[in-house]
Amino acid sequence: MPRDDARVIAVVVTFNRLPLLQRLVEGLDGVDGLTEVLVVDNASTDGTGEWLAGLDDRDQGEERSTTPVLGRTLTDNRGGAGGFHDGLAWAMERGADLAWLMDDDGLPDPDCLDRLLSEGDLDFWGPLVVDEADPDRLVFPIRLPGGTRVVHRLADVERAATGGRIDGIVIPFNGVLVTRDLVERIGLPRAEYFIWGDDHEYRLRAEAAGARIATVVGAQVRHPSVGSLGTPMMFGRTTYNHSPSDLKHYCMARNNLLNLREYRGWPHALAFVAKTIWFYTFSKPSPGRIATSLRAMYDGLRGDFTGHRRYL
């Protein structure tokens, strides 16, 4: 189907960030090519559900929306993974040819969707995610294809791009487009992952299915800074995804191990186990974190995806 005729539905997943969600919904209103916006609320407690329930009132007066917005509040917090699982299924049910997936804290540039839609030969593709306070800096660094070089600045990506894009790389779920055909081939994101690694697993699954993947350099999403990703270890020769959050760490350890085992094999999975033990033994000593990591990994290997609930 030509991109100009495609039914494009945005899927936004949110949890307890009502001001950012409101900013995003306002920014998506009237975007050329966008059919409607679906918001999946992960049982927020900050008034998000009530705000979504009142969106019908925008049909009156000065606040009338030009892009329809529908909200759905889940009965419990299912994390980003569960939110995008449900939201993507919802978009498919509503006849989406393309689903535009995004978290609540990003803000696409007004021409972001138009620039993405100009690429007619892709299955799973997205924008650059830049720091809203420093647009020349990437929020999520990119490892360039064919090597180990990781770039952090917009200028470096632009120099590496061919035809205005970087093929084989995408940063889900921050303003990415996915085709109905690809969803029908590979299914939905893994809801049981809750957070951390679900987006990466979906990209790996798409890649394994032969999907055409790319980052479009001219399309950008503004995003709050998340600081420096990766804590140095082994005398600065590599980094580890350390988080002070026990919830994030548990999910990262469980889900990353499973992703490595599934898509790269046991040697890489066991190397990750060793790296985790090294990090919390020498780089940032914490016997408790070693125990948490091993428990998370064991839970994942035996198919128990309930352990993260103890940290909610």
Image: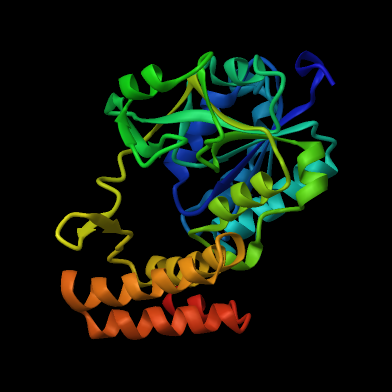
Q: Could you say where residue 124 lies in the image, as x and y percent from the top left?
A: 65, 35
Q: What residue is drawn where x is 40% and y is 37%?
A: 142
Q: What residue is drawn where x is 59% and y is 34%?
A: 176
Front residue (pair 221, 61): 221
Say if residue 77 shows up in the picture: no
Q: Could you say where residue 132 lies in the image, as x and y percent from the top left?
A: 33, 29
Asked if residue 296 lies left or right of residue 33, the reply is left
* Image quadrant in which the N terminus is located: top right
Would you identify the image quadrant in which residue 68 lies? top right
Q: What residue is drawn where x is 77% and y is 53%?
A: 187
Please determine whether, in this image, residue 59 is positioned above or below residue 88: above
Colour setup of the view: rainbow
Q: What residue is drawn where x is 60% and y is 23%?
A: 29
Front residue (pair 97, 241): 241
Please determine whether, in this image, residue 18 is positioned above or below residue 161: below
* Image quadrant in which the C terminus is located: bottom left
Asked if residue 228 lies left or right of residue 172, the reply is left
Please determine whether, in this image, residue 64 is positioned above or below residue 242: above
Q: Could you say where residue 83 lies in the image, as x and y percent from the top left?
A: 62, 55
Say if residue 131 shows up in the picture: yes
Front residue (pair 134, 149): 149
Would you identify the image quadrant in which residue 11 lies? top right
Asked if residue 43 lies left or right of residue 143, the reply is right
Please determine whether, in this image, residue 50 is positioned above or below residue 224: below
Q: Could you say where residue 14 lies in the image, as x and y percent from the top left?
A: 53, 49
- How many numbered dots are placed on residues in this image? 0
